[in-house]
Each structure stands twice: as structure tokens, then as C-alpha cells.
Image (cartoon, helix red, strand yellow):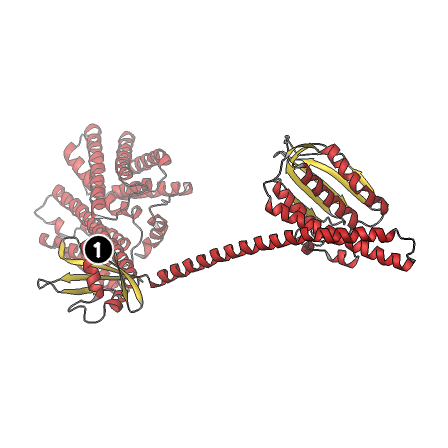
Amino acid sequence: MTALAPGASALRPLDSPARPRYLPLWSWPVVALLVVVAGVVGVGLAPQGSRVAVWWPAAGIAVLFLVLTQPRRRWAGLLLVLGATALANAIGGRPPLAALCFGVANAAEAFVVTALLARRGRPRFELRSLASAIYFCLAVVAGAVVVGLLAGATIAGLEDGAFWSTAAYVAASHAAAVVMIAPFALFPRRVPVRASRLELALHAVALAAVIALVFRDGADLPLAFLPYPVLAWAAFRFPVRVVAVQTLLASCAILGLTIAGGGPFNHEGLDLAVRAALAETFLVTFAGFSVVISAAQYELRDTTRRLAATSRLLSGSLLEASVGLAIAQRRADGRVRVGWSNPTAAALVGEGAERSWQGPLADAADEALRSGEPVTVELDERTLTVAANLVPDEPDHFSVQLVDVTEPLRMQAATLAAEQEQQAARVTRADLERQREDFVATTSHELRTPIASIVGYVELLEDSPRLTDRERGWLEVVTRNADRLSALVEDLLAIGQIAADRDGVEPREIELGPFVTEVLGNVRVLADRKEMTLDVAGCAGTAHADPDDLTRMLTNLLANAVKFTPPRGRVTTRTVEHEDGTVGVVVSDTGPGMRPEELEHAFDRFYRAPVAERDAVPGTGLGLAIVSELAARNHGSVALASPEGGGLVATLTLPGRGRAGVRETG
């Protein structure tokens, strides 16, 4: 067996049928040499006075080679087999034409066997079942018939030999070789086999002893059956690869002992032709028996392994399932007993259920069995759903499924309660929001009158000639704070009005060029006080918005830019048209800008950046919030960005007519 180990390991990649492996091209010359050597050896095995070899190993190597050859290269492989076997016959002493005809016969046999195996095997043929072994033997017989007929015709036509006897001898010798050697290319994937090395050694010794006993000089014919039980022992206990190796070695030993004159087929009462026929028939049946019985045993092992795996999977999933599963039986007296249950069901039905099952669960199972619908039952602060159905072909047995739905029901109840609380909270919040908005709107409206009175009387006091400079300073403080209070009230009223009347807008097409110029005029006074530059980098395009809302949005953005930009700074206004039909008005300044954490809260109501508090910049913290509310009311948006070089960029995006491409105007 050690001499064949390299060949066996070379075939190991073929164990997986999904990815067949083929012989590389560099091995073809080696195969050709093996076929030639095997052919010469076969010629040497021809009995004295016979033109046909008892065994032709080149046939087995040729079939094995073609099985391991890629389908698109098998025609080239057939030519290699033809040439190698023809050369072997020529070396063996046959005339050139006869040698060529024998080469054609060998190639035809290899083609028939390989084609039949390829037709059955997808993607490759394997000896994995009794049916596949029988099919393989039939393919070998078909190939042997073909080569026998062609060889018989060659001998009869070119060498004046007997057609039928030659055909029978050649068919038998080739079939024996193919059935011994070709299985090495057809091994299936490995299946674990529990056989010790000691048993393997004992079997090898027993097989060698039986062969030596049966095929010794002077052995009687009835002893020829003795190797079969020993070979069956190997097939039932060892892997198919071991059986194939043992079969090949045993066949070679039997052939050698027979040629040397030993064994039951060299009986003195038998002529040479009968002896050769018996030896060839024995080799074919011996190897064929090995293939069939080992493939059948492999099928049994593989099926047993699959069934065991399925059984472990099913039993494990049933035993470890969180669902209670039980099989109950209704006796003739009407009582119900539990014959089998997994641990979950056993914990629910209680002890003693194997004798008599009764109680709420049993009643629920009966009701579920009658109605065909699951039944819910309360049991020990738990809620269970019980389902039952009859077991097919067992009218007095039924299966029960017990599902603990306590936690799902609790979660469902908790979820429902949480949703109700959230709904109540939303209603309360909406009511509080409405009350707050009503309060702010009412309070702001009521504050208008006293603020107007304060401003009016302050203006009257400022016209008095009797005031001292100190008193006029006091009046300036009152005026400044009254203006701030008035601006706050107006902003609060604006916020409330926007929230209360989100749909009360009348959008229309607005040409941005003249519109932006007009708004810039409103804030130019503030810019002139700080000696600032107001640039218009070209404003064009059309926006679809409410004119009053757009005026307030642009005024707030430009006023913010002017307030936060240092003296002699610059504020630039431009427009951008987008391919999605929107238009943007971009206001950028050269002020200090805002940090990322400040940008996150820029549109919050009453938010004032730290720089505004530090520099005492006037404002209510509502300007950007109003812009955001108005932009949303006009189906637009506003965004702020602070570039690394400083300054702030505000982009107001509104619906427009839309144009192809993205371009800046100006």
C-alpha cells in the first residue's frame, strides 16, 4: 500500500464533486510513458502460444487518464492513448498495421467508458452508491465489448486468428484492468470510518494468507471463493480508498501466482484456453465485487451520517426549544397521557402527566384540538398559548405546542401604555405651546401701547429747553432701551404671527436684482455709520416668495452682517441659481464669524453669540429665528457657514424658475 500512497494523495482533491480537478498538461508525457510500459508488461503476460494477454493494465490507466482530463482536451487525450498503446503493441512484436489497429481499439474502449461516465456524472462521476457502482460496471462491460470486437476483427483479419475467442479474451483482460485501476479517479468525498490500524494490519495479513493458500501450487478449484469474504470484510470496515488499493494489490498477486503456475485455474484437466478464461473471469468478478460492495457500503455510511446529523439537529432543536412540545395519547377510557415532551413542556405540564394529564392546560389542548385554533390560558401568573393537532396515521395521538406569551403581552401592554402617555404628552405640549404663543402674542400686543407712550413722552421731554446735559443723558438711555423693548415686542409679534399663520402667504415671482438693491438701501444708513462697504456682486434671477417675507428675511440677514462686522468692513450680496430650480441669495461679511458650537444654536430663539454679549451688540436673539421661520413658510431654507479665513456666509434658498446647470450670476 505504501507504494500507491502518492497516487492516492494526488487524487484527493477530486473528493469534492463541486470542483473537479484535472491532470496538468505537464503530466501527459508521464501518462504516455506509463501506458507504454503497462502495454509492454501486458504483452509479456500473454500465455505461451497465445496472442492475447491475460491482463492489460494499459486499458485501466487510459480510462483513468481520460476521466482526469478536461472535457475540451479529451480528443487530444484519445490520440495520446492511441499512440501509446500502438507503440506498446509494436514493441511487443506485432506488425505496424496490427499495432495501429490495437491502438485504435484501446482508444475506442477508453472513449466509450469515459463518455458513459461523463453522461451520468455532473460535474463528475463518483462511486458513491450501489447504483453508481452498477452503472460503472456496465460502462466497463460496454467498453470491453467494443475493444473485444475490434481486437477480434484485427486478429482474424491480419493474423488469421479466431475472432470470437480473441474477442472474449481481450474483453475480459481489458475489463479486469479497467475495473481495478479506473476507480482511483472516481473516489467520492471522504466519510469518517472507525477502523484501527491494528485491524487494517490483521486484514492485510489475512488477505495475503488466503491468497497464498488458494493460489499455491496444486490448489483445488473449490477454494477460489475464499478471498471474497476477506474482501467483504475490508469493504464493510475500511474506507473505499483502502479497499481499492487492497483490491489492486491482491489482483496483481493472484495474477502473478496464476502465471507462475499456481492456483485452482492451473488444473491439469484444463487446457490453456480454459485456464486463461477462468483466470480472466475471476479477476473481473473479484475487482467488480470489490467496487460494488465498497460503493454500497459507502452509500450506507454516508446515508447514516446524514441521518445522524439530521437527527441531532432535530432532537437538539426540539429539546432545547423555548416552545413547549409534547406528544399526547388519548386512551380508550378517555384519559389523556403525555408520552413525550421536551424540557420546556415537561416544566409546564407537571410531573405525573405520563400517567394522566389533566388541568387547565389539558382542557385548553382539548379545545384547541376540537376548534383547530390556538387557545390562550392563564396559569400561575403566566399566559400560555396552546395549539394542538392530530398526528398523521395515529388517530389516538396528537401533538401539543405550548408558547409562553407572558412577556410579549406585558411588553405589548407597556408599549400601549407608553404610546398613550406619549399621546397625552403631545396633547399637553401642544396645548402649552398654544397657551404660550397666545400669552406672548397678547402680552406683546398689550405692551405696544405703554411703549408708544413712553417713546412719545420722552420725545416731548427732549424738546424741553430747561433740561440739563445730565438730564438729556438720562433721556437718551430711556430712549435707547425703549427702542430695544419695542424691537423685542415687534419680533415676538412676528414670531407669533408666523406660527399662527404658516399658510397665510401670497408668493409671487420676484426679480431679485432690484429687490436686493431696495433692501440694501434700508440698511445703508447703518453701514455708513461704521464706514462699511456694501457690495453687490451681481444679483439676478427670480424667486418665488411672499414680498413682505422676503424683505424681512433679507433685512435681518444684512442687518446681522452689518452689526457684527467691524468698522470699515465689507458685506457682499450675490445670488446663485441651481439646476433643481431653486435660487439662493448669499450674504457674506468680514466679521469674526462663528464657532461650530455657535452655529448649531444660531437659529434658536433668543440665542445670542458670546461675541454679541461681549461687545454689547444690540439685538433680541430672534432675528435669525424669524428668518428660518419665514424661509420654511415660503418652502425655502437658510444656512450659515463660517469659512476658515473668517467672516460669516448666510445662504437663503427659495423656489425659483430653475435653469440648467449651476452658475453664479455676476
At a point 83% along the width and 46% down the height, the residue shown is: 569
Q: Position of residue 257 (x, y in %)?
A: 20, 52
534 displayed left or right of 32: right
Give residue 167's quadrant in the image.
Answer: top left
Quarter of the figure with the C terminus: top right
Amino acid type, callout 1: Ala
- Res 235 → quadrant: bottom left
Residue 295 higher or lower than 210, as above or below:
above
**Residue nearest the observer in this picture, 582 or 483:** 483
Seen in the picture, residue 343 relative to 30 is either above or below; the reply is below
How many labels sit on residues?
1
Residue drawn at point x = 29 percent, y = 49 percent: 188
Question: In this figure, which residue is indicated by the disc labeled 1?
Answer: 235
Residue 659 versus residue 14: which sits nearer the camera? Answer: 659
The x and y percentages for residue 55 are: 22, 44
Q: Residue furthest bottom?
A: 351
Mark 1: which secondary structure? Answer: helix
